Image (cartoon, rainbow, N blue to C red):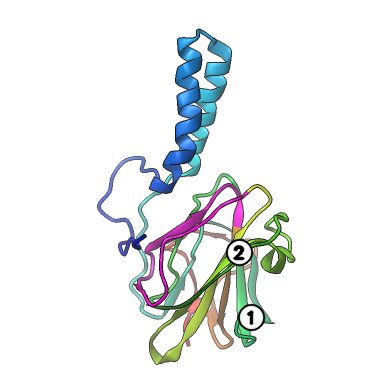
Amino acid sequence: MKQDNTSGMGRAGFVIAKEGYPFIFAPAFTTVVLVVLGLTLPALLFAVLTLFVCFFFRDPDRTAPPDPDAIVSPADGRVIIAGERVKDPFDDKETLKISIFMSIFNVHVNRIPFDGRVEDILYHPGKFFSANLDKASVENEHNAVKITAEKNRSLWVVQIAGLVARRIICTIKKAEMVHKGARFGLICFGSRLDLYLPADTEIKISKGQKARAGETILGYMP
């Protein structure tokens, strides 16, 4: 699948991510069948479920900041780790880690944090612990994308499945050029995004702060 290399500008209304259509169809079809059968209460329950799934897969427009050195959030949600100094699990280099936890009420469309080239994509099947736990970074199912920018600056953005999530969607490919704020995938029903940044990145986010994918500046590349 091709990446959407726009930040979503120019669209209007309540837009649903196309990846959500299969999830919406089942409860919507069930609602129609129940209405035809005259089962009012079950039909209402499935109608509410259909509306919730539509809400979950909403895909609002976002505009990335113009500063070329700004790193933007790849996800909506709450920052649970902000600039912790760790060795990343992929290159074994000293990095600064930022983690963003997405509840089922957050927008789940993931966006590119920085302009560059997709250097590598590593998928790891795993477990489904609650995404806000530290061990979720390593033990849960995850999909790691390495983006290399100018001056050989690179970062990893990792999509991590959570307790309820059972599907990670990534729409970019290795060697593809990607742009800050563009959509690159989503995770279904509660999850987490980890970022591993160069050790001298200037962090501009705090633990507990809310972030918006494609817009909130997490820090600045050195």
Q: Which residue is mark 1?
A: 88
Among the 4 quarters of the image, the one containing residue 81 = bottom right
Query: Is 52 one of the magenta-colored residues?
Result: no
Query: Is 174 one of the magenta-colored residues?
Result: yes
Residue 50 position in % (x across, y down): 49, 30
Q: Amino acid at mark 1?
A: Asp
Q: Which residues are magenta?
A: 165-191
Q: Which residue is mark 2?
A: 142
The answer to whether marks 1 and 2 mark residues whose Cβ atoms lie closer than 8 Å is: no
Q: Residue at x 36, y 79 (%)?
A: 68
96 in relation to 131, above or below: below
Q: Secondary structure at mark 2?
A: strand
Q: Residue at x 36, y 66 (%)?
A: 64
- The one of 123 and 114 positioned closer to us in this rendering: 123
177 in relation to 73, above or below: below
Query: How many other residues sit within 10 Å of disc 1, few (<14), some (14-19) or many (≥20)?
Result: some
Q: Residue furthest bottom?
A: 151
